[in-house]
């Protein structure tokens, strides 16, 4: 096991869904940096309508956990060991077609944004902008859920 690998932490929500419009969004976060995982999950837990149901450290774990848990959203780093986020996004979209995929990276370029879209991500987030842009991502996921119900 490498220094960056760690087992998936899966947490079942203590807040069951009561109504389709007000249910909490179930999120899986995938990043190979334990520090970034801790920080981003702490930020997400501050959101009233969010439950981080699992956090994983690589693309292979992300595919397995998302296929098992079928979350509303997977927030995943592009650069990860075992399997990168782009490849994982393709496989996740096949195995969990109702899960919204948002890829993120500390790098930002038009080419990377195009690649993320081509590989099945609904959105790309530049990591430094995550805190500012995440509320828009949440709103988009909620609108998608309402449209499906």
Image (tube, grey):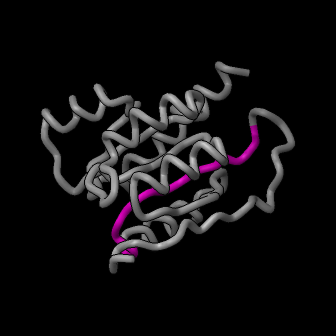
Is residue 133 toward the left or the right of residue 21 in the image?
left
Residue 72 locus on image (x, y percent) = 61, 40
Q: Is residue 45 above or below residue 132?
A: below
* Nearest to the observer: residue 57 or residue 44: 57
Residue 11 locus on image (x, y percent) = 69, 65
Quadrant of res 110: top left
Residue 2 locus on image (x, y percent) = 34, 77
Is residue 22 toward the left or the right of residue 121 in the image?
right
Residue farthest along the front direction in this orientation: 1
Is residue 91 toward the left or the right of residue 55 in the image?
left
Q: Is residue 87 above or below residue 57?
A: above
Q: How many numbered badges does the structure rendering display?
A: 0
Residue farthest along the bottom direction in this orientation: 3
* Nearest to the observer: residue 114 or residue 61: 61
Is residue 28 toward the left or the right of residue 57 in the image?
right
Q: Residue at (53%, 60%) from the top-left corner?
A: 44
Q: Residue at (40%, 38%) from the top-left corner?
A: 89
Write the start and end of the magenta stretch as one range: 22-35
State which quarter of the image contains the C terminus: top right
Q: Residue at (54%, 42%) from the top-left corner?
A: 73
Residue 21 locus on image (x, y percent) = 75, 33
Q: Is residue 80 magenta?
A: no
Q: Residue at (21%, 29%) from the top-left corner?
A: 114
State which quarter of the image contains the N terminus: bottom left
Q: Is residue 39 above or below residue 53?
A: below
Q: Is residue 33 magenta?
A: yes
């Amino acid at each position: 096991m490498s220094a960056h690998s760690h087992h998936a932490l899966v947490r079942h929500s203590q807040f069951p869904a009561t109504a389709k419009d007000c249910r909490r969004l179930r999120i899986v976060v995938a990043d190979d940096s334990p520090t970034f995982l801790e920080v981003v999950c702490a930020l997400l837990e501050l959101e009233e309508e969010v439950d981080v149901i699992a956090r994983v450290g690589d693309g292979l774990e992300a595919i397995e956990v998302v296929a098992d848990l079928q979350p509303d959203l997977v927030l995943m780093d592009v650069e990860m060991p075992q399997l990168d986020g782009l490849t994982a996004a393709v496989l996740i979209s096949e195995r969990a077609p109702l899960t919204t995929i948002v890829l993120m990276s500390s790098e930002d370029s038009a080419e990377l944004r195009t690649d993320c879209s081509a590989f099945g991500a609904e959105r790309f987030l530049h990591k430094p902008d995550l805190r500012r842009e995440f509320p828009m991502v949440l709103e988009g996921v909620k609108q998608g859920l309402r449209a499906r119900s």
